[in-house]
Image: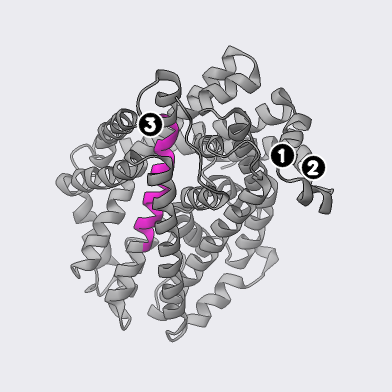
Amino acid sequence: MKREHWTSKVGFIFAAAGSAIGLANIWRFPYLVGAHGGGAFIVVYLLCLILIGFPVFISEALIGRETQRNPFNAFRILGKRKAWGGAGLLVVATGFLVSAFYSSVSAWILGYLVEAVTGNIHQFETVENAGAHYSSLLLNPYWGVGYHFLFMAICTGVLYLGVRQGIEKGNKIFVPMLYIILLVLVFKGLSEPKAWEGVKFIFSMDLGQITPAIFLMALGQAFFTLSLGQGTMITYGSYMKSNENVLGSCVPVVWMDTLVSLLATVAVFSIVFSAGVEPNAGPSLLFRTLPLAFSTLPGGYLFGVFFFLLVFLAAVTSQISAMEPTIAYLIDEWKWKRHYATIATGTGAFLLGIPCALSTSLLRDYLFFDKNILELFDFTATSILIPLGGLLAVLLTGWFWGAQKAIDSLKHGSESTLQRYPWIPFYFKICFKYVSPLLILFVFLNAIGVFV
């Protein structure tokens, strides 16, 4: 079966940017900045992005472009051992698991978008009121499963259309929309009273606030923000033509991803400070603190609608990227037609995600290791499988395929760039072999609580 490819370099950039830009940028990054020292966290994060996020991102894209296969076959081809095929299959399974629980969480975003449009989240007087409304929605099993089904149906519909007509065209629409909405929120937020107090908080540089704990949090964010370790970038890389400039295609994605994180932080904290609410609310920032802010600010209705539309678009682009490795695997290895593979993947992820969607309602009393089902899925994927997948990819590149062979592959299409910047191959070689594997190990150990 002939493999689909992106129509252009721009197609990959928008698709990869859509995958990278998700809840980690618009939800997690702002609350981490708020809870871990403002600008000090941002400085450490950018350093970690250079040392771990960008090299692993390049590594996975190279694996895909070199082999033109899904992660299972790509690992097996470059690793030259059957065991590496098993490692690749683990990466595919990770993406499928992520797509199941990510949809159940993104369902809350879609639900809150509808709540914002209908005006139900713009009448709160206290954080407690906003929290009570949030809790009442999560306790409704029909709300959770219904929006989980609707969100999954939307994402499956995009994927059903194919690589070019679905993923590429969809991201060329969704990503620009996301930026437009984000810029509107930034400009509107900065026009509010006390908004610049939020900007000052974000970019204040008290380097004395940098602690080992902040470093580890920044390290994890730099790794997770680019959708690494779950087969997405290997799969998207496999849709690149063999002579495509990997370096020139990946650098804009990292810039776009970082820009969204920073702009989202500015938008959130200009709103939060103008509303006079606490900036260090943590994970509850999205569903408790911001709705209160929308309730107190002039024009809060439009603020709320635009904000949750922004988060919804980011969730869609990330969800379709999490599902695509499984679809590619079924097409490549089982020789299924894309339509069948897409429907099977969407149906399977929806069914697997139902217990997650019910974990705050009917199944809330079912705990495993003191975690509900959604938390268990999340922990298994983000704390164990994703770091393991990223580690396997960079070890494959640096040690089994070989760092020098990977650099030689990188040179295809990137000759002029590497001639202008001759230090780049050395940087990637050191990161592939030593720096990135070591830092991913720190991410893994921190995630499982070794450093607590």
Write down the residue under mark 1: 410
- Compared with 33, 405 (above or below) is above
In the image, residue 404 lies at what x, y percent? 78, 31
Residues marked 1 and 2 touching at CB (< 8 Å):
yes
Magenta range is 310-326
Q: Main secondary structure of the magenta part?
A: helix
Does residue 354 appear left or right of residue 226 in this picture?
Answer: left
Which residue is nearer to you in this view: 236 or 427?
236
Q: Left or right of 237: which side holds 346?
A: left
At which x and y percent is residue 199?
54, 76
Q: Distance between the Cα atoms at labels 1 and 3?
A: 44 Å
Q: What residue type is labelled 3?
A: Phe
Nearest the eye: 70 or 36:
70
Q: Mark 2 points at which residue?
A: 425
- Residue drawn 45% across the image and 62% down it: 176
Is residue 176 visible in this depiction of the protein?
yes
**Which of the 4 image quadrants contains residue 300?**
bottom left
